Amino acid sequence: MSSSGFDLPGTGDGVDDGGVPYAGLTPDLLLNALEAAGFQPDGRLLALNSYENRVWQVGIEDSAPVVAKFYRPGRWSDAAILEEHAFVQQLADAEIPAVPAIARDGRTLLAHAGFRFAVFPRCGGREPELDRADTLTWLGRFIGRIHAVGATQPYVARPAIDVDTFGVAPRDWLLAHDCIPHDLRPAWEAVAALAIDGARRCYERAGELPLLRLHGDCHRGNVLWIEASQAGARPPGPHFVDFDDSRMGPAVQDLWMLLEGDRAAMQRQMADILAGYEDFAEFHPRQLHLIEALRTLRLLHYSAWLASRWRDPAFPAAFPWFGTARYWQDRILELREQVALMDEPPLWPA
């Protein structure tokens, strides 16, 4: 599942992108934006895998390449983007391997020809091997350190991950915009209601938990692993990138997406992660009640994200199966499975 940046209209800048938010973002404009910011691009451009924003690796004369991220108009406010930049810089200052934006004249959020963008150092690496206990423990240590910093102050301009923002709002948006085929709408609406109710029960069982600044989308694709033989100026091990979905939420949000396989495998993996995590941050075991609830909410959120971005020409090309009857039939079955899973005992580490 790719990063899902769905937000209801009005939660960002309130800019209407007309469905074609990047129509004017040509290679020439991109290079001119970098040059105006004080970089010297050499003309080499490589588009990187991103749908929510537009991201390129840009060659720089007599220097290492950089990564330029052009933000989707209307999604995040300037304040929300700057909060994320400040958090990642805090992590880097604490010698945690996150990749902060490059400041120009004290500013990390730049603008050119109506587009907002940021520039980052290029960080190469491969996906982590999540079937290795030592890798999971290493990841757990650094996520624990990220959360120790994230707990020092809250976000003000960014919302939280919870049942309302990731469940109710996406469900209501899909229904209001008539996204589900009419013959499948009653079944989908009924199972979505059951899923949201099940998620609420999970939150009730978990009880009141501290919320902190999170990565928010901490799956293997947003962790770059650098081998010791390739480290160079960067330390070996995991490097955390793309905090674009960073929000307030429970700590387990940054842990459950690293789990895979059957229940027994996930129990072992969680034990390995927590073996490192708890060296640096306290983990409240009651959060384990939230794993399947958070998975369920992400599924609802993802469907709404795809639907809300469908007028962006990049989305029909990349997700041609979305919106078909088969797609919504599969989502109904998926949510039914999640309703059952949310009533099972929580995933205690092995």
Image: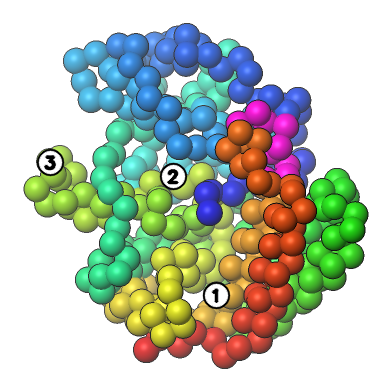
Q: Are marks 3 and 1 in contact (CB under 8 Å)?
A: no
Residue 346 coordinates in the image, percent (x, y): 54, 86
Q: Residue at x 30, y 19 (%)?
A: 59
Residue 232 badge: 3
* Figure check: 295 above or below 170: below
Q: Amino acid at mark 3?
A: Gly
Q: Tell me if mark 2 has few (under 14), some (14-19) or many (20+) residues whose alpha carbon lies within 10 angstroms of its own.
A: many
How far is disc 3 from disc 1 in space, using C-alphas? 37 Å
Q: In terms of image quadrants, where is residue 123?
A: top left
* Figure check: 31 above or below 197: above
Segment tinted magenta in the rendering? 306-314
Q: Nearer the viewer, residue 14 or 105?
A: 14
Which residue position is annotated with label 1?
Answer: 291
Q: Tell me if mark 3 has few (under 14), some (14-19) or many (20+) residues whose alpha carbon lies within 10 angstroms of its own.
A: few
Q: Is residue 337 magenta?
A: no
Q: Is residue 313 magenta?
A: yes
Q: Is residue 174 left or right of residue 244?
A: right
Q: Residue at x 47, y 13 (%)?
A: 27
Q: Earlier in the sequence, mark 2 or mark 3?
A: 3
Helix, strand or loop under label 2: loop
Helix, strand or loop under label 1: helix
Residue 230 badge: none
Helix, strand or loop under label 3: loop
Which residue position is annotated with label 2?
Answer: 242
Q: Nearer the viewer, residue 64 or 300?
A: 300
How far is disc 1 from disc 2 in space, using C-alphas? 22 Å
Q: Amino acid at mark 2?
A: Asp
